Image: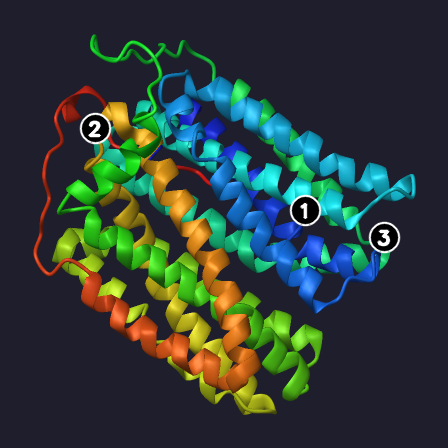
Amino acid sequence: MGRSLGRQFRWLWAAYAVSTFGTWLAFDAFALIAILALDAGPAEVSVLAAAGLAVGAVVAVPLGPWVEFRRKRPVMIAMDLIRFAALMSVPAAYVLGRLSFAQLLVVAVVVGAADIAFTAAGGACLKALVRSEDLLVANGRFEATTWTATALGPPLGTAAIGLVGPVTSVAANAVSFLLSAVGIRAIGGREPRPARTATRSRFEAGDLLEGWRHILASPALRPLFFNTVLVSGLIMAASPLLAVLMLGDLGFAPWQYGLAFGVPCIGGLIGSRLARPLLARFGRHKVMLTAGTLRACWSFGLAFVHPGPTGLFLVIAVELGLITCMGVFNPVFATYRLEQLPPDRVARTLSAWSITSKATIAAMTGVWGLLAGLTGPRTAIAIAGVLLLATSLLLPRNDRTSRPKNADQAPPERQPLA
């Protein structure tokens, strides 16, 4: 088996695992609740998906600097408890017959903002727990956990909804955040309070933009920022259109649709295991450039999906290739990014990155919905695939690694995202 990263990391990993499985158990749960329990139409479901991301990202803007100068584990526990309380309000209101679309929207915003704050605090927490030389191992374990949860969670959650009711998976997700808080509390040890510099003794308005300023001023981070944000946005924008195409126009059964996206998650496990040996043999820059380029080459093939077994196989093959490349790229990229962050800018930079990514996904999802209405789902998917090919041009062609000031004060970190 792999090397041991210590008891404290194991508790952090356990907290990450349980909340990640909970999140994927509740994948698309709000949309299903809106449709099954509130008779919501396509427009309302789209608003719920996009507004939760967009408004949650805006609400999270001041959270980055707020998190930066506080102990990270109490912040993570607080965000877990906030998510637990917000999500549990949904089954409670459903049982009482008081559930409304407005409540779902508010809960989506609260959970989205808490996700971003947890992400920022989690990165700094891991930075303090894991040695620099063990960071890629930790990233690989988080990546493998993510893809395992992605493969198992949605089918189990959908089955639970069908057997028990539409709010079952939301309740399970809420409980997962409570268990995550328990795991983080169990890490133990003393966490020192982060100190501001002598000239920055209190919160200032400029702190809100510090994360973006650091990203855009860094020749190492800037191209990766634009690349990863656009890749995520384009992949997620095409996802609901592929669902419409497969389940509607092409007549695939729901179980076939689930199979098409569950089986390829094996690629994420394979990629996360390959990342470390590939890095040792070819070097970080070559692995990140190659895997980053290859992950942009697959999605265009989804425009050619057709009915029948061969069409299903095509989707599985395309998704397998895409997810395998992501499984290699993601932990290497996470390690590289976090090595570029000075300890006093970790939370703000990760918050800025996450906020931009979520807002971009929300905006692109809306735009591609309109585009599909004008051109059809297949054409819109093809356009997203062509644009994804172009994102590889944003990857850095040269190794622009720079050692941040005070980098020797703490090892690099990665943010666990629940």
- Label 2 Cα neighbours within 10 Å, binned few <14 / some 14-19 / many ≥20: many
Q: Report the amino acid beneath label 3.
A: Val
* In this view, the mark in front (3 or 2): 2
Q: Position of residue 73 (x, y in %)?
A: 46, 20
Q: Is residue 201 above or below residue 87?
A: above
Task: Give the Cα separation between the discs numbered 1 and 3.
Answer: 23 Å
Label pair 3/2, CB-CB below 8 angstroms: no
Q: CA distance from mark 3 to mark 2?
A: 48 Å
Q: Is residue 13 above or below residue 295?
A: above
Q: Amino acid at mark 1?
A: Leu
Identify residue for label 2. 342
Q: Nearer the viewer, mark 2 or mark 1?
A: 1
Label 2 and label 1: CA atoms lie apart by: 36 Å
Task: Give the residue displayed 53% in from the left and 37% down from the top.
Answer: 113
What residue sits 47% from the left and 85% below the top?
379
Residue situated in front as seen by the camera: 42 or 408: 42
The residue singled out by tag 3 in the image is 164
Which residue is disc 1 drawn over?
A: 105
Along the viewing direction, whichever of 195 and 251 lies nearer the viewer:
195
Q: Secondary structure at mark 2?
A: loop
Q: Position of residue 19 (x, y in %)?
A: 58, 39
Instruction: Determine which quarter of the picture holds residue 79.
Output: top right
In this picture, residue 194 sits left or right of residue 259: left
- Tell me residue 2's x, y (percent): 35, 41
